[in-house]
Image (cartoon, rainbow, N blue to C red):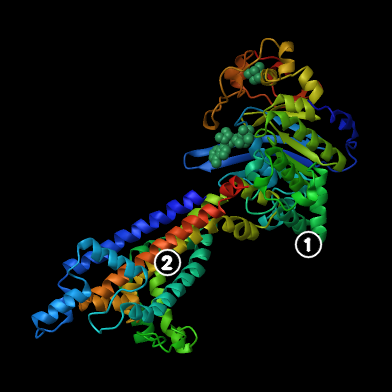
Amino acid sequence: MIAFLIKRIANAMLVMLAVAFFAFMIFRFVGDPVEMMLNEQATQAERADLRAKLGLEDGFLVQFGRFVTNAAQGDFGISYRNQQEVIGLIAERFPATFELVIVATIISLAVGIPLGVVTAIRRGAWYSEALQFLSIIGVSLPSFVVGIVLILVFSVTLGLFPAFGRGETVQIGWWSTGLLTELGRAAILLPAVSLSLFQITLVMRLVRAEMLEVLRADFIKFARARGVPARIVHFRHALRNCLMPVVTMTAMQIGNLIAFALITETVFQWPGMGLLFIQAVTFVDIPVMAAYLCIVSFIFVALNTMVDIAYAVIDPRLRGANG
Amino acid sequence: MMHETRGFRDRRPEAGEAPPALEVRGLTVEFPSRRGTLTAVEDVSLSIAPGEVLGVVGESGAGKSMTGLAVLGLLEPPGRIAAGEIRIGGRRVDDLPDREMERVRGREVGAIFQDPLTSLNPLFTAGAQLVETIRIHLGLDRRAARERAIALLREVGIPAPEERVDHHPHQFSGGMRQRVVIALALAAEPRLIIADEPTTALDVSIQAQITALLRRLCDEHGTGVMLVTHDMGVIAETADRVAVMYAGRVVEVGPVAEVLRAPRHPYTRGLMGSIPALRRRVPKLTQIDGSMPRLNAIPSGCSFNPRCPQAGPRCRRERPALAASGAGLAACWLEQGGVE
Ligand SMILES: Nc1ncnc2c1ncn2[C@@H]1O[C@H](COP(=O)(O)OP(=O)(O)O)[C@@H](O)[C@H]1O
Ligand code: SF4
Ligand SMILES: [Mg+2]
């Protein structure tokens, strides 16, 4: 178990180093930071001074080492665009993205699990087939199209929900939440639904496949033979045996959702990390881009590693081996 | 081998005292498919008295499991009962709607399947599954149900039941798990138990213990048992009567002692080759050549005729019906006026 832990964590760190290297290379190949930070009238002396201050005269490995050490402490430097600490900018935007992703995840589970169960136990019924068909469409629809359609229908035509922004937010320490106000909740609904649509179809298909598998198990036949009512067989005995893969996939998908949120945030002008990144790209604000890359990758890698470790802990065979 | 069971055999109630635990009349099970209908069970009639163990033998694919599943109302679609009647404790059950059949399963008829490793839900403790079954059928409160669960575990011979009740299936050995399964099948005191090869998946050394346990419990509770097996040895040890199935039909049925001593049907004689102790007594037919026909290629006449050493012209023309023969019934022209 300890060896497994060490191996898994070393693995994760290696991946993060590779990402950091990639982010670092953006600095080296996309323009000269000195040119970007100073205006045209800056003197040669000023330039040299800044070069030295930024450590650009040092060797490649020294620079990379410094980048990694700083990044590991959350220091991604100063934004080119508005001269603020990058980490501060990201921290300001993180709650918006996080809340969007969490609400989207909850929607996808709340809708996807029952749909998966229904399509599995009512296999062949017309509504199961229809849901299966819709889920194929759901998987293939580009998320910006979904967003635009939702805006057109629910904001522009029906006027039920705002088309952009977070509505009203409340500040709790450094965290700004939109979930505590009526306007905030109304504002999060459309982008969360838009972001969750793909996820709903994933959850539904996974639950359906797992349910079909589990429903063939002997213990299901035996539960029915004991006279356990169908509803309890389906929801207590079968569904519970499907939840492990669903939890795993959901945890792993959170990283994906943060990445996909980029598009949703752009469509809905949602002030999250994705929108920050898009703005950074338009202004070639490299420190912000690099920080976004590193942080999103970190969330990804951390979730994957935790899921793997949780699996090893939960797996009864491993549990048995440990006594 | 355990012989503890033999002494209980004569205790079963006299016929007519109570309705039979199981009565099957003319049962036919079909699997409709695009390329025609397969008949897995055809015109099967059986009856089991309270406390009686009916052994059902036959090669794999003979229709034993389908008969049991039909009684339980657990045939997987498209499989269906195409004809016949099934009565449990005198009450007709083959035409009950799903909701009512749920109340019959577990309460009136219990089941034990082949593999104790997979019959229990791995996520729930033995106790949770027992309490669930008991509460569904007997409506006890949680505490009383738990008391009963512990008593049941004790009854099926699980040591330290107060502790074991909270263990998960993977903490039990194969034999102990099958005991838990038996406790589950008996939880609501059904009149009938369908035991489909209950020991096949178990270690040879504990098979006899499990069948003896089943036999003893059913004697004590007056439960009828349909004991499906392809092992004539188990039948000899445990059953009161035996039904021999071939290609979806019952070809011979009679008291175990009779059938073992003087089998009437050539197929039964062939099967006897599989009991070591009896092999010397039937020197010629220690095994049956060939294999059972596929369901879509059942020969005309007697379905056993391509493999039967005594087959004659009549066997290829006409199908023999079950008719009285010795102390039981047999479906063979040899017993009904010859094969010519
Ligand atoms: N889903 C199915 N579709 C068609 N035939 C089936 C199906 N399930 C079982 N059968 C057939 O039913 C027959 C009886 O099977 P079964 O009752 O399981 O035999 P056994 O006596 O070994 O328990 C077999 O010939 C088998 O091929
Ligand atoms: S009827 Fe003929 S073929 Fe069939 S078992 Fe009897 S002798 Fe053999
Ligand atoms: Mg079988």
**Image coordinates for residue A4, horizontal then vertical, percent:** 47, 50
**Residue highlighted by disc 1:** B142
* Residue A122 in sight in this render: no
Q: Nearer the viewer, residue A245 or B183?
A: A245
Image-based side of A250 in relation to A266, left or right: right
**Image coordinates for residue B9, horizontal then vertical, percent:** 86, 31
Alpha-carbon span between mark 2 and mark 1 = 40 Å
Question: Which chain is disc 1 placed on?
Answer: B
**Residue highlighted by disc 2:** A254
In this view, A258 is above or below B201: below
Q: Is disc 1 placed on a helix, strand or loop?
A: helix
Question: Which chain is disc 2 placed on?
Answer: A
- Measuring 22% from the left and 80% from the top, which residue is drawn there? A80
- Measuring 51% from the left and 64% from the top, which residue is drawn there? A113
Q: Residues within 10 Å of mark 1 (few under 14, many from 20)?
A: few
Q: Indicate which quadrant contains ligand 1.
A: top right
Q: Quadrant of residue B206?
A: top right
* Residue A160 in sight in this render: yes
**Image coordinates for residue B122, horizontal then vertical, percent:** 63, 50
Q: Residues within 10 Å of mark 2 (few under 14, many from 20)?
A: many
Q: Contact, CB < 8 Å: mark 2 with mark 1? A: no
- Measuring 79% from the left and 17% from the top, which residue is drawn there? B261
For the residues carrying marks 2 and 1, which lies nearer the camera in this image?
Answer: 2
Q: Amino acid at mark 2?
A: Ile
In this view, B240 is above or below A32: above
Image quadrant holding the C terminus of chain B, namely top right
